[in-house]
Image (cartoon, rainbow, N blue to C red):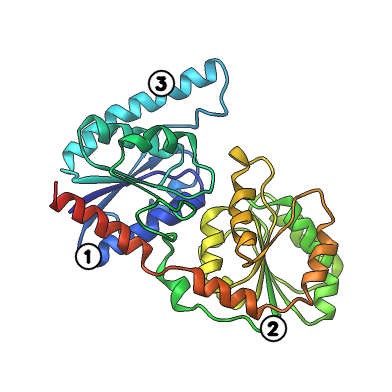
Amino acid sequence: MKLCITGGGTGGHLMIADALLEAAHKEGHECIFIGSTHGQDRKYFETNSAFSDVYFLETTGVVNQRGLGKLKALFKIFKAFLTSRTLLKKHNIDATYSVGGFSAAPAAFATLSRSIPLFIHEQNAVTGRLNALLKPYAKSFICAYDENSSIHGYPVQEVFYKNARVRESLNTIIFLGGSHGARAINDLALSVAEELSERSIHIIHQAGEADYKRVKKEYEKLGVTVELYAFTKELDTLITKADLAISRAGASTLWELTANGCPALYIPYPYASGDHQFHNAAFIVKNEMGWCQREGTDLQTQLLILLDNPLKEKSEKLLSYSTKDVASQMIDEVQKALTHA
């Protein structure tokens, strides 16, 4: 099978693409990737990728544009749509898997225009506008929060399951603001750094590239030793080391923590489309697997309270809820659909 995986813009979408690529390769399938020159697509897949071919087309998001900006964005998508049609034909693509994000639009529409089966994964509890538009035309629509989804669970790389463990005591805490960082989480980490150090709790902190220098200077002023990163692709190793996470509630990170059994206090990005990060975290809280606190509340007090909370019960619930081999199930579903077409 020759599969096109498309989508991206953010790390969350691209992690799903990576998980699907890993699963497809295990089954001997060939994959190409069609993404965007904007966002993080190139950072993930331009080099050292297992895709047979990667393409980055000139596109930008449409939803947040206004007036002339929206027209320019739509024109870029139309040009990329025409290029995607050519690429799908060139590689004799059998099916396309969209992982969402603005990067997915050209190849997804090109797939439908060529009568190639389209499969969609929705990563959030609130369906994105593009996915909502394409859902009626897709062969399958997978979402971990949807009871009607033909596959339950979230595609996470195997390493998160392989290194999963029950957290019984708090020795290491990790602060995750996402690839771009999150000032609220960075400031929270700095506000409790001395207390954590006094308790001999090791700090791992991904501060984001934009805020890294400031955070580094503040830790130096405090005289607190931390394991600090601007950006890293070794999150699996860092999450495995941690006993508690303080994180945004982007879907991929949320389900990676779940798969690894690491309890988390989620601080949703308040400006996420449809407030989807809050709804992602609310799903975890509803199932008593973690905590959620809004920005603008007393985050420091809430975190200090959690330091004395038992972790084992939450960690065990996370491990019992997570579903292994979701990416493999998604690839198998595509293969079966093509076989019976």
Residue designated by label 3: 75
User: Is residue 237 shown above or below 12?
Assistant: below
Q: Percent from the top left, x then y, of residue 58?
A: 41, 32
Q: Nearer the viewer, residue 158 or 322?
A: 322
Residue flagged by tag 1: what amino acid is it?
A: Glu
User: Is residue 314 shown above or below 40?
Assistant: below
Q: Which secondary structure lies at badge 1?
A: loop
Q: Percent from the top left, x then y, of residue 255?
A: 52, 62
Residue designated by label 1: 27
Q: CA distance from mark 1 to mark 3?
A: 37 Å
Q: What residue appears at the point 48 percent right and 43 percent down from the top-left corner?
A: 9
Q: CA distance from mark 2 to mark 1?
A: 39 Å
Q: Nearer the viewer, residue 281 or 58?
A: 281
Q: Earlier in the sequence, mark 2 or mark 1?
A: 1
Q: What residue appears at the point 62 percent right and 67 percent down from the top-left corner?
A: 289
Q: Earlier in the sequence, mark 1 or mark 3?
A: 1
Residue 161, quarter of the rendered image: bottom left
Q: Which secondary structure lies at badge 3?
A: helix
